[in-house]
Image: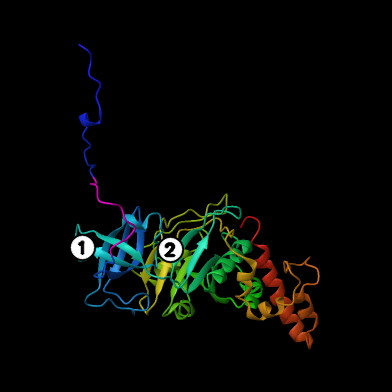
Amino acid sequence: MARRVPDESDFRSRPGKRGSRPRTKQRPEHADAVTGFVTGVDRGRYTLLVGHDGPDGGDAAGEDERTVLAMKARELGRTRIVCGDRVDLVGDVTGDDGSLARIVRIQDRSSVLRRTADDTDPYERVIVANADQLVVVTALAEPEPRTRMIDRCVVAAYDAGMDVLLCLTKADLADPGPLRALYEPLGVSVVVTRRAPDGLAPDGWAIEPLDAVREALAGRTSVFVGHSGVGKSTLVNALVPDAQRATGHVNDVTGRGRHTSTSAVALRLPGGGWVIDTPGVRSFGLAHVQVDHLLHAFEDLDAVAADCPRGCTHLDDAPDCALDEWVEASPDDETRAARAARLESFRRVLASRSGAA
């Protein structure tokens, strides 16, 4: 007897586990979503404040304010959510133990601070969102200040449309004057702190004076960046007494500090405003920064540079650069000195876009 050849009638297709509903790119609107302010990120889990008016919500927690733990919805894909983001949440937003909400949407960002791994890496890493001030914490000694790193932080901040505050620590060990002279011509605000022995402090030191620092931070969302060992976490602990940020020491051989902050966290300042403390950094790539965009942060230089020849780099060796003519055309010696200092500082930070920090 001949063997029967099976045909299509012998096979029955079964619907897959996901069913046979046609796929669509339409997503639910989540009209019932509530707003959350991201204060921490840890291995795919996000800590948020709900019932809060955002970074400008004041210095005290409201009656309805609560901390919520959330995960990112699948439809957001690889979209990066960072400290400072304001997002839309659905699901269990009670904040009760064991509850987990879902982030379904990131609200428009007023600013984005970015960096790349190096100046050849096209991949941008978003560090913080919706901050309006970058605080570059730099020790005057132990470890020695690295001006190239400061320059690159200034470039990244101006590219993001943020103000810059240079906080010089350990003034008990060195004179802050030279660094002031480098950065004040760029419009960078500078505050200076020193250490004083304090047997009650975890590391044996107290930071003083803090009034100028608090005044510069009041009512703002400020991102703290700096090398390990410069006193950044110690400063944050002094500003936010219950922050409990880990502190470290400087290696006597390498002159470098050890990373103690492992993730970014947003902390409420007692007098109003927020501090976002970030892990210590050793490099700050600027592959994403365009020269023209950076120029916009310097309105006087931007206006003059409009007369530069096409393709002008605006650096020292740029032929027929209008910025040099601007200095030469100064009406008096005092103006010439001020313009020359500003142009020199600008060219220094511009040159920092290439090479390691």
Tag 1: amino acid: Asp
Q: Position of residue 351 (x, y in %)?
A: 68, 63
Where residue 210 is drawn, which disc sits there?
none
State the extent of the magenta-drawn residues as a range. 18-28
Q: Write the residue at 54% across / 53% down.
A: 117
Q: Is residue 59 left or right of residue 278?
A: left
**Spatial separation of the CA atoms under disc 2 and disc 1:** 44 Å
Q: Write the residue at 71% across / 76% down.
A: 305
Q: Which residue is mark 1?
A: 92
Where residue 204 is drawn, which disc sits there?
2
- Which SS type dominates the magenta stretch? loop
Extreme residue in the top direction:
1
Q: Nearer the viewer, mark 2 or mark 1?
A: 1
The mark nearer the N terminus, 2 or 1, is: 1
Q: Nearer the viewer, residue 351 or 11?
A: 11
Q: Is residue 186 left or right of residue 129?
A: right
Q: Nearer the viewer, residue 270 or 72?
A: 72
